[in-house]
């Protein structure tokens, strides 16, 4: 298949869609971008591939199944939605189940068209008072020797531990953050009732992100900004946003972009029910109730989402968010945060990780390292 495509291409230098021909070499690097002498809108749209640092499953499969077959199904499903990179995200679970995920990550066969980049452990060191859909019986007190074991187990893994969500207000949390960062693991603060001072202490210890801002944390208060306030104001914190219109009201999404657009990392927090019919679906050890808009525990607690990145893109455009800000949140910011060299941008010398969409922003195809991994 030809190593080129003509499209209305999103170029970071302009923040606009420019009619152009993008060519890439056999190694999968973009070799040339040539502007086309046309103003046609009939060409497809080409954006940098989406990078989701927080997703639990798709297509009826869950990361916690800890089998290569289930993870391959998740990869294939996400490719259909324009994803060119994601972190396989755990849920808080009994220790043997977490170790099974870690074992799979050590040996998982990674090929040129693989889109799984590593692991995100959401827990188990969380605040029980803000557990959300995390099972309280599996939330653990922080034990530094456990964390040393996790880091060591991730060394030389084919899919290393890239990110862990920790509640910064728990005993031993600051020491845990320092240990994780020293071991090459980034730390999000989340599932926490942390005060402003506790959140700032987490950042001082090395944490550099907030897991799904506003969700599963103490609410913003004008006399106690808490973790939400720190996420909105600290230049050292990336902030995850779930933009399904259920987790956060569109007005609040607009506010976050107005305050912190360069630090927004868009995520789905998606679960196994993505691309499935409504009904009962798995999230870790839970079975959750899924309708056409959300996933919830039996008590009504939100339990991840059924959002996909392309649906997030369409939502955000409808809510008045600029394409520049959306591409920043879905591609550029996560690539910078995860230090993915040559990813997240369409430019000469970068990897050809791209998503082709039609005029309604429906995915037509996905390219990873110059190879089509999905064609509609």
Image (cartoon, rainbow, N blue to C red):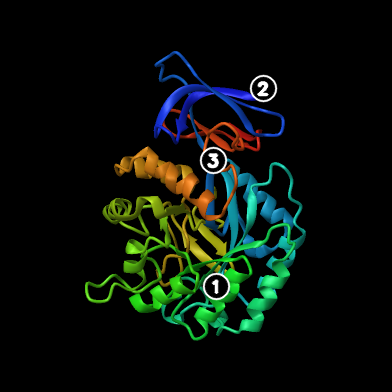
Q: Residue at x 38, y 38 (%)?
A: 323
191 relative to 61 in the view: left or right? left
Q: Residue furthest top?
A: 37
Q: Element at badge 3?
A: loop
| Residue 191 location, quadrant | bottom left
Determine if residue 277 is in view. no
Query: In this orientation, which residue lies closer to the viewer: 37 or 272?
Result: 37
Q: Position of residue 68 (x, y in %)?
A: 73, 56
The 10 Å Cα crowd at callout 3, few under 14, some 14 to 19, many 20 or more, is many
| Residue 284 location, quadrant | bottom right
Q: Element at badge 1?
A: loop
User: Which residue in the protein does label 1 denote?
Assistant: 123
User: Which residue in the protein does label 2 denote?
Assistant: 2
The quadrant the C terminus occupies is top right
- For the residues labelled 2 and 3, the Cα–Cα distance comes to 19 Å
Q: Earlier in the sequence, mark 2 or mark 1?
A: 2
């Amino acid at each position: 298949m030809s190593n080129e495509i003509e499209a209305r291409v999103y170029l970071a230098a302009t923040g606009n869609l420019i009619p152009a021909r993008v060519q890439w070499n056999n190694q999968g690097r973009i070799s040339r971008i040539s502007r086309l002498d046309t103003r046609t809108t009939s060409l497809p749209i080409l954006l940098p591939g989406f990078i989701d640092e927080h997703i639990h499953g798709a297509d009826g499969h869950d990361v916690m199944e800890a089998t290569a077959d289930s993870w391959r199904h998740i990869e294939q499903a996400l490719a259909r939605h324009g994803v060119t990179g994601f972190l396989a995200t755990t849920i808080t679970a009994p220790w043997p189940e977490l170790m099974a995920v870690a074992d799979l990550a050590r040996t998982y066969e990674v090929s040129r068209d693989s889109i799984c980049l590593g692991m995100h452990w959401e827990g188990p060191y969380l605040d029980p008072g803000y557990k959300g859909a995390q099972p309280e019986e599996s939330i653990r007190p922080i034990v530094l020797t456990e964390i040393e074991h996790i880091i060591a187990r991730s060394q030389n893994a084919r899919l290393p531990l890239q990110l862990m969500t920790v509640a910064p207000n728990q005993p031993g949390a600051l020491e845990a953050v320092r240990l994780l960062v020293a071991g090459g693991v980034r730390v999000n603060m989340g599932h926490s009732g942390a005060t402003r001072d506790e959140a700032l202490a987490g950042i001082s210890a090395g944490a550099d992100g907030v897991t799904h801002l506003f969700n599963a944390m103490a609410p913003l208060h004008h006399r106690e900004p808490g973790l939400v306030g720190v996420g909105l104001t600290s230049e050292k914190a990336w902030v995850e946003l779930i933009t399904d219109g259920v987790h956060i009201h569109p007005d609040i999404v607009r506010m976050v972009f107005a305050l912190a657009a360069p630090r927004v990392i868009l995520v789905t927090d998606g679960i196994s029910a993505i691309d499935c019919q409504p009904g009962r679906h798995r999230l870790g050890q839970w079975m959750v109730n899924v309708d056409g808009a959300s996933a919830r525990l039996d008590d009504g607690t939100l339990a991840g989402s059924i959002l996909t990145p392309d649906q997030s893109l369409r939502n955000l455009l409808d809510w008045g968010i600029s394409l520049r800000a959306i591409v920043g949140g879905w591609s550029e910011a996560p690539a910078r945060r995860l230090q993915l060299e040559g990813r997240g941008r369409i430019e000469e010398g970068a990897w050809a990780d791209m998503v082709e969409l039609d005029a309604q922003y429906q995915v037509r195809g996905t390219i990873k390292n110059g190879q089509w991994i999905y064609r509609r």
